[in-house]
Amino acid sequence: MMHTIINPKTLSDPRGYSNGMLCSPGRILFVAGQVGWDSSSRITSETFAGQFEQALRNVLEVVREAGGKPEHIGRMTLYVTDVAAYTRDAKRVGEHYRALVGKHYPAMTLVQVAALLEEGAMVEIEATAVIP
C-alpha cells in the first residue's frame, strides 16, 4: 500500500492535515458518519473533545473491522455544530487524534452544521480509507 501526500507549494502549508492523499493500490472503504456514542447508542461525553475521541474511535473500529489501520485513511470529514467549541478544545482534540492515529494526517475538511441527527451530538466524523 502506498500513500503519497500531495501538498502543492502553490497552496498554504496545511497544519494537522494534508491537502491531498494519493492511495494505491487497494480496496476503498467508505465509513459512514460516526458520532461520540457507545454500542448502546449513548453519547459518552458532554465535552467536544470527549465526543471527538469517541467518534474517532468508532471510525477506527470500522476501518479495523475491514482489515485496515489508521494509516489507511485517506480522507476525513468532520461535521461540527460549533466551530468555537472545536477551537476551544483544539489542543485536546489534537492529543486524542495523535494518541489514536499517530502522525498520519489524511486530507481533512471541517464543516459547521446547524445540527446533527443524534440528539446531543457535537461532532460527526466520516472517512474514506484505501485498504491493501
Image (spheres, grey):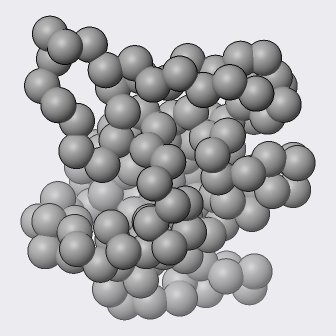
Choose top left, top right, bottom left or bottom right for residue 74: top right
Vertical position of residue 83 compared to residue 105: above or below = below
Q: Is residue 120 visible?
A: no
Q: Residue at image x 39%, y 50%?
A: 78
Vertical position of residue 70 compared to residue 91: above or below = above
Viewer-closest of 84 and 19: 19
Vertical position of residue 127 compared to residue 84: above or below = above
> Residue 48 location, x and y as percent?
32, 77
Q: How many marks?
A: 0
Viewer-closest of 23 and 53: 23
Q: Residue at image x 50%, y 73%?
A: 99
Q: Is residue 77 left or right of residue 128?
A: left
Q: Is residue 99 visible?
A: yes
> Residue 15 location, x and y as percent?
22, 44
Quadrant in which the C terminus appears: top right
> Residue 84 location, x and y as percent?
11, 65
Q: Residue at image x 28%, y 43%?
A: 111
Vertical position of residue 80 compared to residue 76: above or below = below
Q: Residue at image x 36%, y 33%?
A: 18
